[in-house]
Image (tube, rainbow, N blue to C red):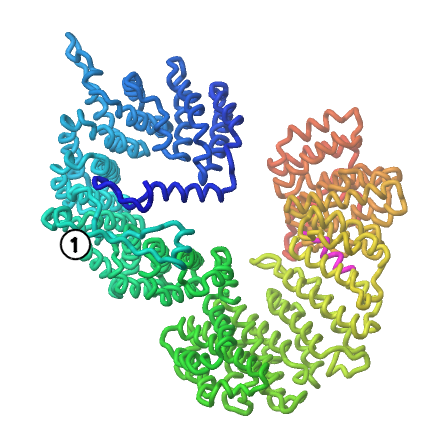
Amino acid sequence: MALSEEPAAGAAEDPVEDPVEDAGEDAALACGAALESFGESAETRELLGHLPAVLADRSAREGALERFRVIMDKYQEQPHLLDPHLEWMLNLLLEFVQNKTSPADLVHLAFKFLYIISKVRGYKTFLRLFPHEVADVQPVLDMFTNQNPKDHETWETRYMLLLWLSVTCLIPFDFSRLDGNLSQPGQERASTMDRILQVAESYLVVSDKARDAAAVLVSKFVTRPDVKQKKMASFLDWSLCTLARSSFQTIEGVIAMDGTLQALAQIFKHGKREDCLPYAATVLQCLDSCRLPDSNQTLLRKLGVKLVQRLGLTFLKPQVAKWRYQRGCRSLAESLQHSIQNPREPVTQAETPDSDGQDDVPEEVESVIEQLLVGLKDKDTIVRWSAAKGIGRMAGRLPKELADDVTGSVLDCFSFQETDSAWHGGCLALAELGRRGLLLPSRLSDVVPVILRALTYEEKRGACSVGSNVRDAACYVCWAFARAYEPQELKPFVAAISSALVIATVFDRDVNCRRAASAAFQENVGRQGTFPHGIDILTTADYFAVGNRSNCFLVIRTIRELSAKALRNLAQRAPEHTAREVFPRLLSMTQSPDLHTRHGAVLACAEVARSLHTLATQQGRPVSDFLDEKAMHGLKQIHQQLYDRQLYRGLGGELMRQAVCILIENVALSKMPFRGDAVIDGWQWLINDTLKNLHLISSHSRQHIKEAAVSALAALCSEYHAQEPGEAEAAAQEELVKLYLAELQSPEEMTRCGCALALGALPAFFLKGRLRQVLAGLRAVTHISPKDVSFAEARRDALKAISRICQTVGVRAEGPPDEAVCRENVSQIYCTLLDCLKDYTTDSRGDVGAWVREAAMTSLMDLTLLLGRNQPELIEAPLCQQLMCCLAQQASEKIDRFRAHAARVFLALLHADSPAIPHVPARPELERLFPRAAVASVNWGAPSQAFPRMARLLGLPAYRYHVLLGLAVSVGGLTESTVRYSTQGLFEYMKEIQNDPAALEDFGGTLLQVFEDNLLNDRVSVPLLKTLDQMLANGCFDIFTAQENHPFCVKLLALCKEEIKKSKDVQKLRSSIAVFCGLVQFPGDVRRKVLLQLFLLLCHPFPVIRKNTASQVYEMVLTYDVVPTAVLDEVMAVLSSTAWDAELPVVRAQRNRLCDLLGVPRPQLVPKVSPAPQATWGTWGPFLVRPPNTAP
């Protein structure tokens, strides 16, 4: 049917919906999709053919099912690609189903595959291919006898069987012909008709998806000519009784009502009007008594609305409204052509009293319309959407006057006394009416203003707002109107609609609304051809561009902040209008009782004032040309008015503090003529109070407010505390520096943070003569003391402040230390920063010292590059070597983020060439190991890329100690990828020096030095013990086994004994046991001492340590040839058969037996000296015993 043709007069359902247009849209969507055909055809055929083979293996069966599901899900967006393949897939699966010898599990599996296909393609298309001959009715019906409705594993079987039965019900023969003789002697058989109806009724009340298929079956079965005469009345009676006795307060009642309502809605949809009309009033009355709108079940309310509209359509004759508006052409190309050359007149058909009289409208229709209007205000979208479609369908069959009354009732939803749900439902209903041509052009003058209000609808609810769904639906109305009306009908409203859509496209805070507005604008540009600058706007603000929030607002931290920045950009376009109209309104809004309005207005004032100053500067004009004295006074009064109303307190005060700080910064940067004004003292008070009370601000806002206050302070001091260019007001300088230095010792960490950053933000002339004092105060903050050990954030911010101060005051080699970075103070600054690289403080938040180390690395890089550019001679060789070695250590440690940062800083200093940083140790070797081009693409945060490269530095003596220290922590860490790749990098280097005794000696000495320097430092010693265990187990020091009592193993044993002395750390003790077992491979007296330590641990007070020691000693005996063959079996028997977690006397006897077997002196009990008059005996342990014949 062509779009311009008149539909048939007897069309019963939605005459304005055109399948040709829908097919064209589907084709357009298909052309833009990614897939072109069903590419997995061969794999699917093989998968389906092998179902019997995988049936026995549950894992294979589930794998096949999951694979098929994955294949099908790819075509959810393009299911039509499956159409050429549906028939052979169906035939393959039905072979298993119809084969009498197929096991039940195979049949169920086949139906699972059939369900997946129907889910993707849709059962309406897929069902057409099912066998539906007369011979298929009984076999399908007989399959239900083997089904268990309560088996939740096989619901797909019952679902597909019900759908299959529904299509077989369409055979054009009376069902009585299939029954034969039902009353044979000795047995009574139910008729086919009764059996089908019984199956349908039983599955309408089940809890799974088979209920939906049963409703489809009922609609196809009960509406048959032979069945409706005998069974329709009884089925409707059963349905109404089910509804009457069910309650939506219970789960069983909800399930029964759901299936029954679905069935009734399908019957009144597919049944003939003359068959359903006699029962419609009764069904409507029963439905009213169910009180479904009071239910909290969304699906029941939706089905109730759906059934109500079907009943309403039954009451009205299926006719096309002669009065409806018809757009003569819907082709986009023709629309554009005719809008320019020869606009087409709309077609409105004349009304005929015979077919459109009010006498034909039953009184029940009023009740139906009323329920649909109530449905428009439902709290759930799917109910409102169903009601909106019902309103459109009903209006299409009503006389013109009554349909206009319905439109008026819909417009009543757009009252500000109504909720957002009513507005949303009203928009959907208007779109449906317009799309169907039932909203006449004469009504547009009433409808368009309502839609424009809906495009900006927002309702506050507590701390949030609702209304995005209303704005989205309003965009849908605009989209529908573009397709429904001729350009001349919408021409009076083009300006209002286009501007509203552009504003929504650019400034709506919800991405879906921006995209909907863009799509509606695009549809209007294409269909109407009358939108001004349509193509240009679409090019800039297309559907995808508006998805980026920041892109929308600025060419967003919060929407209000970015809206303020957008106003700044708009002010550049229309400065006079902004200054005359916008700015005074913003000033009045700063005193609004609403927090969010007040916050946004203050931000907007700040940005607009800055924008107007920038424009005035560009044009060589004073800012007073834009902002008069009244506006200036309004700006100054914002802070005082907020202070007087105590609006800086509480949760809302956080927003206002931040906003006013941003205002102060922008006013100062705009050089407003406020110098000497009392408002400066008020602004300074606000900044100081904010920085001193940061600990009272919520954690999620603290950082933003701190940054805003510090930025405001920097701008304020530069502009309003300067007596003359380059000179600070003495009083202000004295007061501020003294205040911030005093607060650096505050017991509140956040106060220290704020004041440290404030000192760092002071301009250079403010630090003149005070630099030494300020640096000393910040240096004191970076020191760790017992009372502030957890103040990591304060130390971090102090380092940031030191770095910023160095950049601010600059470098003068021979300058005074109170004014610049110079020869006298540079070493002290370096020492402060380098000391902070050793901050490994941990608390409940984890390694908080990492924040300090990161800030220290950044500050060191900035300071070194600054010195390199200006005074490279100030970089001393020892300091540079210490710096590069510490960075190499950090680049070898275990936390990905900080390792990557250290590597970037290390390479930035190595590759600096303007000029090069002097005194970098082993620069030629480093440049060979880390060429600039090769390392540019390395992801230093990835262990697989970082550790193999950093381990190469072990070959450079200058870096070996620090790199080994970092690698030891990583190798002994917990993260699997970090341990794997750091170990790999370390062992690669060890392989290179295995045959070089001198290199191995040097490496061993460095390793022992790392251990000795970090004794009892659990952060290093525990992972170092794990590293040593791996190195000993992998034979890294096998070359030392050729010499008895090699110094390496002797010292390592001594260090291990010292590390675990008096230790109760189970993890450390376990790691040391592994190291002791590795040390047993070294010959000489050291082996006897190692065995003694292990035997001491066999009687440790902790049972878990005793068991672990026995287990590892057992493995050691198997691995190393250290036990004489004569006693080997007995030693292993003792180790394996003894219950080492038993009482100590029992364990001690077995331990002594092992000592005797291996020739190791038995440990002797040592008396524990006590100040009490009577001596007490100590417990066995590695620190309370000593071998015989040794000094106490």
* Magenta region: 885-894
Residue 987 x/y as whole percent? 77, 43
Residue found at x 47% / y 90%: 629
* Residue 142 against residue 395 in the figure, above or below: above
Among the 4 quarters of the image, the one containing residue 146: top left
Could you tell whether 1126 is left or right of 376 in the image? right
Tell me the chief SS of the magenta region: helix
Among the 4 quarters of the image, the one containing residue 142: top left
Residue furthest out toward the front? 342
Could you tell whether 1105 is left or right of 267 in the image? right
Report helix, strand or loop for mark 1. Answer: helix
The answer to whether residue 439 is visible is yes
Residue found at x 41% / y 44%: 25
Residue 154 x/y as whole percent? 37, 27
Among the 4 quarters of the image, the one containing residue 920: bottom right
* Residue 251 against residue 501 in the figure, above or below: above
* Residue 726 against residue 904 in the figure, above or below: below
Residue 558 x/y as whole percent? 48, 66
Q: Nearest the camera: 653 or 101?
A: 101
In the rendered image, the quadrant that contains the N terminus is: top left
Q: Nearest the camera: 631 or 126?
A: 126
Residue 1189 x/y as whole percent? 80, 44
Could you tell whether 1088 is left or right of 51 in the image? right
Q: Name the residue under label 1.
A: 402
Q: Nearest the camera: 139 or 1128?
A: 139
Identify residue type, mark 1: Leu
Q: Does the segment drawn in magenta span residue 888?
A: yes
Q: Nearest the camera: 711 or 287?
A: 287
